[in-house]
Image (tube, rainbow, N blue to C red):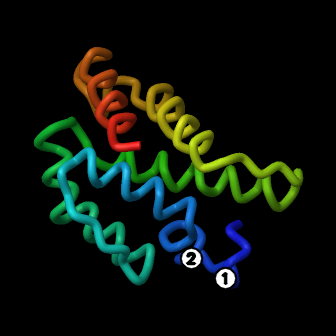
Amino acid sequence: MCKADSESVNHLLLHCKAARALWEVAFSCLGVCWVASDSIKNHLVAWEGLFGRKVRKKFKGGWSLSHVIMWCIWRERNRRAFEGVENPIQHLKDVVFKTLYFWDSGRMCSSTFELFILIDSLYMGC
C-alpha cells in the first residue's frame, strides 16, 4: 500500500505510513501515548487491555474504533491494488470518521451527540 516495504498484515495494518497516521490520531484523541505493536495480535491484546479500558470509560465499547480503522485501511489497500486509485491520507481519515458514524448504531456511544463529540475530538487530532 505504501510502496515502502513488503506487504504483510502487520505492516499494512500497523506500520505503513497511512496506518500509523490513523492510529496516532485515534490514540491521541483518547489521551494515550501510542507505540506501534510488533503484530496485530499484540495490538489487539493491548487495545482490549489497557486501551480498551480507557476507551470504555469514555465510550461504550472500545472495539468499534479499532475495527473501523482496520477495515478502512483494508478497503484503501484494495482500491490501490485492484482499481489503481490512491487517495490521500486526509481522505482516508475522513472515510474512518464516516464509517465510524455509520457503524456505531449506539454501541460505542450512548447518543448521537456523544458520537459527534468523538468524531470532533478525532478531527482536532488531525
Query: Of residues 126 and 75, which is closer to you in this image?
Result: 126
Q: Position of residue 103 (x, y in %)?
A: 47, 32
Query: Of residues 117 and 62, which is closer to you in this image?
Result: 117
Report which residue position mark 2 lands on.
Answer: 11
Q: Residue 34: give its label.
A: none
Could you tell me how far apart the alpha carbons at marks 2 and 1 are, in whole angstroms? 8 Å
Numbered disc 1: secondary structure: loop
Q: Amino acid at mark 1?
A: Asp
Numbered disc 2: secondary structure: helix
Q: Amino acid at mark 2?
A: His
Q: Residue 5: give its label.
A: 1
Name, please, the residue furthest toward the left.
57
- Left or right: residue 43 versus residue 88 is left
Q: In the image, is residue 97 above or below residue 77? A: above
| Marks 2 and 1 in Cβ contact (< 8 Å) | yes
Residue at horizontal 20%, vertical 36%? 59
